[in-house]
Image (cartoon, rainbow, N blue to C red):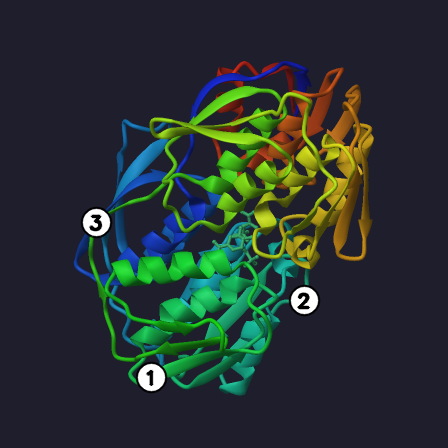
Amino acid sequence: MSDIRIQPQKLSGIVHIPPSKSMAHRVVIAASLSEGQSIIRNIQLSDDIIATITGMRTLGARIDQVPDPKIDGGVSLMIHGANPTGAQQETGIVREIDANESGSTLRFLVPISSLFPGETHFIGRGKLGSRPMTIYEEIYRDQGLSYRAGIGDLLDLQLAGSLKPGTYTVAGNVSSQFITGLLFTLPLLEEDSQIKLTTELESVGYIYLTLDVLQHFGIQVHFHRAEGLFEIPGGQSYQATDYTVEGDYSQAAFFLVAGALGNDVMIEGLDKDSAQGDKAIMDFLQAFGAEIVEQGDAIQALAPAGGLTGGVTLDGSQCPDIIPVTALASCLATGETVIEHLERLRIKESDRLAATAEELSKLGASIEVVDDSLVINGVASLNGQAEVWSHKDHRMAMMLAVASTVCSEAILIQDSECVAKSYPEFWQDFQKLGGMIDEWRMGE
Ligand SMILES: O=C(O)C1=C[C@@H](OP(=O)(O)O)[C@@H](O)[C@H](O)C1
Ligand SMILES: C=C(OP(=O)(O)O)C(=O)O
């Protein structure tokens, strides 16, 4: 546990944004399933990425890291792929994979583990054990495979058996991570498969990232979005290749909102042609009247002269990770703003829907949860002089840090260390930009 106190202070300067966590998970997995060696550049060792690297090592990939001088704490990875041979045979192997708090690691590696002989025991921490897994549970049970989940709050899941090729009928509105996990796995089965969606697909941008990485590693999948259908030829193999991970728009969102709220932050390291769905933060801020300017390869959000103008309705169904910080911008935009379709925010590292409303209210914002929406009435400023809680959720902690820059008094953020899940250098970068942390309280 560590709490930090932040004095209100405008940020100013350049931040080099860390590599995309979503891309890094995918590329580490694809390289680990490839024949031959890949070099993956621009990796940041966040807790979630460490969980995926360790998990793929456990499945047999050889992953060596060398320092990458270009980013603080960054590395390149040399990956020799493992050889998935199927799990049919009784081997007596029981391996343990610690997914820590990473939903992506768990939901990507569950079907992938079925490609390897033996049993896999997934463990984890925090809320991971209570995040939905029913889609996989049903698939395993329907195929007569062994799926044993422990009864406590902590993740404790034992699996055995190989997934079979065929037709997978899956809801598209629980988590796109199940679909990504299947898309990684099914091309390696001997026969063709299909995934048929029974609902609209949410978080669709993440599926496009998956398809992008699969293609890069030589895997073909045909996605017919209008029909909600993926056609996946079997008998394919991943081809090793080199890859540099692009910057993370989900993290850039914090600094873009900071800019739209009057801070002066230039962001480097993003790919302007990126397929990341969290690029939507730029559309949201423009809807509030902020301007996004480019200077060479860097971008910055500028506050409009009279402040942000709200009174709009935004759809959060495709980009759940940027909603807490979008809500912060909405709290300081005039008029009533509604952010709708936020059901899945309840099943992240915290109940982000409730947590966002609860913590921003402590700072004097007018924000409430109505069904699956946030309804926000803009206020002129936030108060501060409050203790706020990250709910042990990295995206809440970083959103509250940005909020501190527009508070009239200091705020204390409890459980601030959770940023390590996706952005271990966040507090250093915040301070480099002038963020004024004047007290760290370390505890148990
Ligand atoms: O595939 C991914 O990399 C992710 C998908 C999203 O989850 P859902 O599909 O569950 O919304 C997102 O919230 C998560 O942080 C990363
Ligand atoms: C929800 C997140 O990640 P995951 O689902 O991989 O735990 C996140 O990074 O905000």
Report the label total.
Answer: 3
Q: Which comes before the other along the chain, label 3 or label 2?
A: 2
Quadrant (top left/top right/bottom left/bottom right) for the C terminus:
top right
Residue 401 location (% of width, % of height) = 63, 27
Q: CA distance from mark 1 to mark 3?
A: 28 Å
Quadrant (top left/top right/bottom left/bottom right) for the N terminus:
top right
Please report the residue visible at 39 percent of the width from the left and 60 percent of the height from the top.
Answer: 210
Residue 23 location (% of width, % of height) = 39, 50
Instruction: From the image, tell me which residue sits under label 3.
Output: 242
Residue 91 location (% of width, % of height) = 34, 77
Q: Is mark 2 within 8 Å of ligand 2?
A: no
Q: Residues within 10 Å of mark 1 (few under 14, many from 20)?
A: some
Residue kind at label 2, given as amino acid type: Ile
Residue kind at label 1, given as amino acid type: Asp
User: Is residue 441 at all visible to an observer of this figure?
Assistant: yes
Q: Quadrant of residue 343?
A: bottom right
Q: Quadrant of residue 133?
A: bottom right
Q: Which comes before the other along the chain, label 2 or label 1?
A: 2
- Between 37 and 129, which is closer to the camera in this rendering? 37
Instruction: From the image, tell me which residue sits under label 1.
Output: 192
- Between 92 and 103, which is closer to the camera in this rendering? 103
Q: Quadrant of residue 440?
A: top right
For residue 428, above or below residue 419:
above
319 relative to 232 in the view: left or right? right
Secondary element at image label 3: loop
